[in-house]
Amino acid sequence: MSTLFVCITCRREADPPAEVRPGARLYAALKEQATDLEVVPVECLSNCTRSCTAAVAAPGKWTYVVGHLDPEQNVEDMLQFARLHGASADGLTLWRDRPVHVRKNTIARVPPMPTPKEPA
Ligand code: FES
């Protein structure tokens, strides 16, 4: 199972300061709908100028950071991508299978940590 890390402090330039942060709204929507995925709030994924931001990760798999997420438009995109990621062996999914928003707004992919070697 893959984990969705969602930045709850993301705010886009045009958002009014008093409004609930879009990142927090994105997190709430994903948490409510992702009954089969773990959704974890985090404070800043260092992608602030391209917010909202979420990352999909799992042990032994590539991690993907996705930006420009709209809490009203892209919840299903991230759920679909996290499920694809979870079903893959190594986190690598076919480009054509990814939701269009994910294809166009992947900020980074990070290789999995090497598995510690067994002591000889
Ligand atoms: S505040 Fe969300 S990535 Fe920095």
Image: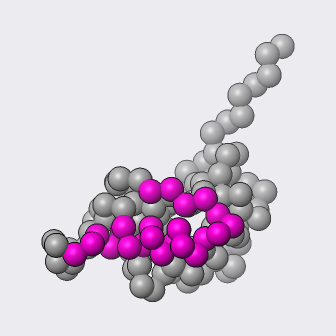
Residue 3 horizontal side relative to residue 117, left or right: left
In the figure, 71 relative to 40: above or below? below
The answer to whether one can see residue 107 in this image is: no
Q: Residue drawn 76% across and 62% down?
A: 88
Q: Residue drawn 69% across and 79% down?
A: 97
Residue 10 coordinates in the image, percent (x, y): 31, 65
Residue 6 horizontal side relative to residue 59, left or right: left
Q: Residue drawn 71% across and 62% down?
A: 86
Q: Residue drawn 76% across and 65% down?
A: 87
Examine the structure image and report whether residue 96 is included in the region drawn in magenta: no
Residue 106 horizontal side relative to residue 95, left or right: left
In the picture, the quarter occupied by the C terminus is: top right
Q: What stretch is highlighted in magenta?
A: 19-41
Specify the color scheme.
one colour
Residue 56 horizontal side relative to residue 42, left or right: right
In the picture, the quarter occupied by the N terminus is: bottom right
Which residue occupies the extreme left position in the image?
Answer: 17
Which residue occupies the extreme right position in the image?
Answer: 120
Which residue occupies the extreme bottom position in the image?
Answer: 73
Determine the image quadrant of residue 20.
bottom left
In depth, the one of 108 and 89 nearer the eye is 89
Residue 43 coordinates in the image, percent (x, y): 35, 53
Residue 38 coordinates in the image, percent (x, y): 61, 59
Residue 21 coordinates in the image, percent (x, y): 28, 70
Determine the image quadrant of residue 80.
bottom right
In depth, the one of 103 and 68 nearer the eye is 68
The answer to whether one can see residue 7 in this image is: yes
In depth, the one of 87 and 27 nearer the eye is 27
Examine the structure image and report whether residue 27 is included in the region drawn in magenta: yes
In the figure, 79 relative to 43: above or below? below
